[in-house]
Amino acid sequence: MDDTITTTYYLCDEFLKAIGHRDDPQVRLSTAEVMTIPLVACAFFSGNLEASRSFLDQYGYIPKAISKSRFNRRLHAIEPCLWRTLFDVLAEGFKREHSEQTYVVDSLPVAVCDNIRIRRCKLYPPEEHGEAFRGYIASKRRYFYGLRVHLVVSGKGEPVEFSLAAGSEADVKLLKELGLDLPEGSTIHADKGYTDYHYEDLLKEVGLHLKAQRKKRSKRPMAAWEEFLSKPTRQYIETVFSNLSALFARRIHAVTPRGFELKIVCFLLAFSIQCL
């Protein structure tokens, strides 16, 4: 734990220095320390920010603690682009060390509440959003209400790209919105939900190869040997999702949609740091 906390703070501090970020001289807690608290919370306390803040204060990791309300204001004052940029920095390092150029894309459902409580959901009220956040989990044959994390991981299970979307959004639609800033010649393995022949042709023009699992009576069937070799690679992301979900609490507590989405991003960052 001590090594992870130290690495997390050092990473945040060096990242902020590299982008030229400067704190006000009067602040008691630096931005690097504020960023460290939720990342430690997601790594060891199932996302409980207050438990993480109290732990770091009690054991001397934070020399000058601030109140709970003041910490929440400081946390939400951090621009969302900073979290995204930090993730991109880690992802760039993973891509440089990954010489096989094999990647996998899939989506992970993150429920906001149980199905029975959908009508009372305050984060994403159904009367405002309709069925936008109601998605279907094919593997479990059940519906859920919340977001989908669309994640691209390397062959070693290291996250390199992600996006958050409403639960009802189709996988292939979100794939098209990902940047896919991958090395030329990379192969992206996916399941049946990412089948789009036209988009596959477009990716080939830029040097990327999308290998989506084929449906029955597909117009472009995949060779049996190719399907056999790609199946273990596609299944590897399930292990990644299991390890990522193990960090989650049974229920991710948040008061606002932005706070809920921020916690998901922090879980992804905490998992990325563990992959270093």
Image (spheres, rainbow, N blue to C red):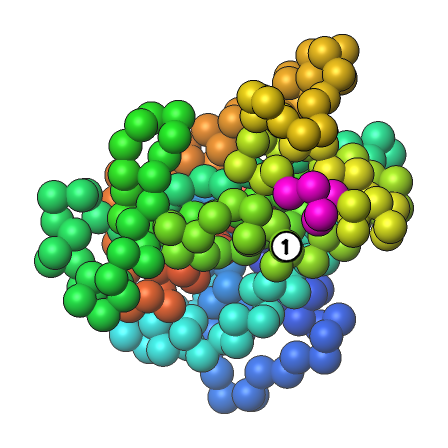
Label 1 Cα neighbours within 10 Å, binned few <14 / some 14-19 / many ≥20: few
In the image, what residue type sits under mark 1? Lys
Q: Which residue is mark 1?
A: 176
Which residue lies at the image location 52% right of the left edge and 45% below the top edge? 171
Helix, strand or loop for disc 1: helix
Q: Is residue 11 left or right of residue 118?
A: right
Which residue lies at the image location 49% right of the left edge and 33% below the top edge? 241
Place residue 37 in its image quadrant.
bottom left
Place residue 261 in its image quadrant.
bottom left
Closest to the observer: 128 or 34?
A: 128
Residue 82 in view (yes/no)? yes
Q: Which stretch appears magenta? A: 196-200
Which residue lies at the image location 45% right of the left edge and 56% below the top edge? 165
Secondary structure that dominates the magenta span: helix
Q: Is residue 40 left or right of residue 105?
A: left
Q: Is residue 91 left or right of residue 77?
A: right
- Tell me where residue 180 appears, x and y as whole percent: 72, 52
Q: Relative to 25, does residue 227 appear above or below in the rendering? A: above
Q: Relative to 219, does residue 260 appear above or below in the rendering? A: below
Does the magenta run of residues contain 89? no
Closest to the observer: 143 or 152?
A: 143
Q: Relative to 244, does residue 150 appear above or below in the rendering? A: below
Which residue lies at the image location 27% right of the left edge and 56% below the top edge? 131
Residue 45 in view (yes/no)? no
- Tell me where residue 197 appears, x and y as whole percent: 69, 41
- Tell me where residue 51 appears, x and y as whole percent: 31, 52
